[in-house]
Image (tube, helix red, strand yellow):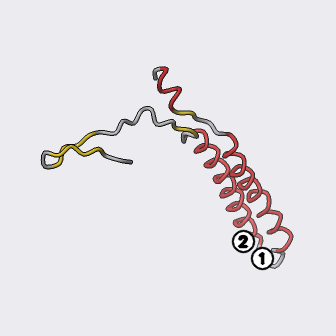
Amino acid sequence: MNENENECVEFGNKASALPGALSGAAIAIGVPIVTLTLGKSLAPAVQLTVILVGVGVGGLIALTSTFFSLVIPSKVNGCGCAKPKQSIHGNTVEQTF
């Protein structure tokens, strides 16, 4: 990666990772609390299954949100994407994005 690419693209917007991580943690903590509080009529195997699925889904949401907020560029200045010129039937046409 050269110096020009560093100026064009910025990674790691931590502000976008925080809401996803917090909501995933809330799901991972909230589902077991609600299941243990309100699910007394459920069989123990069903309670355990719901708790494990809630913790797994909440953790997956938190990890996915954090991973993609670090991998996806948070700012792209557009200095690496030139507008190519195309020739259509002999006429030069600029492609717009």
What amino acid is at disc 2? Val
Say few, some or many: other residues with alpha carbon within 10 Å of mark 2 (under 14 / 14 to 19 / 20 or more). few
| Place of residue 10 in the rendered image (x, y in percent of width and height, measured from the top left) | 57, 33
> Left or right of 6: which side holds 89?
left
At mark 1, the secondary structure is: loop
Residue 35 location in percent, x, y?
Answer: 79, 69
Q: Secondary structure at mark 2?
A: helix
Name the foreground residue: 4 vs 95. Answer: 95
Q: Residues within 10 Å of mark 1 (few under 14, many from 20)?
A: few
Against 3, residue 92 (above or below) is: below
Q: Identify residue for label 2.
A: 46
Q: Residue at x 29, y 44 (%)?
A: 94
Please give the label number shown on residue 83.
none
The amino acid marked with disc number 1 is: Leu
Q: What separation in Å lies between label 2 and label 1 (alpha carbons)?
A: 6 Å
Q: Depth check: 52 or 29 in front?
A: 29
- Name the residue: 71% across, 54% down: 24
Give the residue at the far right of this rendering.
Answer: 37
Q: Which residue is mark 1?
A: 42
Picture residue at 13% right of the left edge, 45% below the top? 90
Toward the top, the furthest residue is: 3
- The residue depicted at 67 percent of the width and 56 percent of the height is 56
In the rendered image, residue 51, in percent from the top left (x then y), is placed at 74, 63
Residue 45 vs residue 40, the one in the foreground? 40
Q: Is residue 30 left or right of residue 56?
A: right
Q: Work out which residue is located at the far front of the displayed protein and give it.
A: 91
> Do the residues under discs 2 and 1 have CB atoms within 8 angstroms?
yes
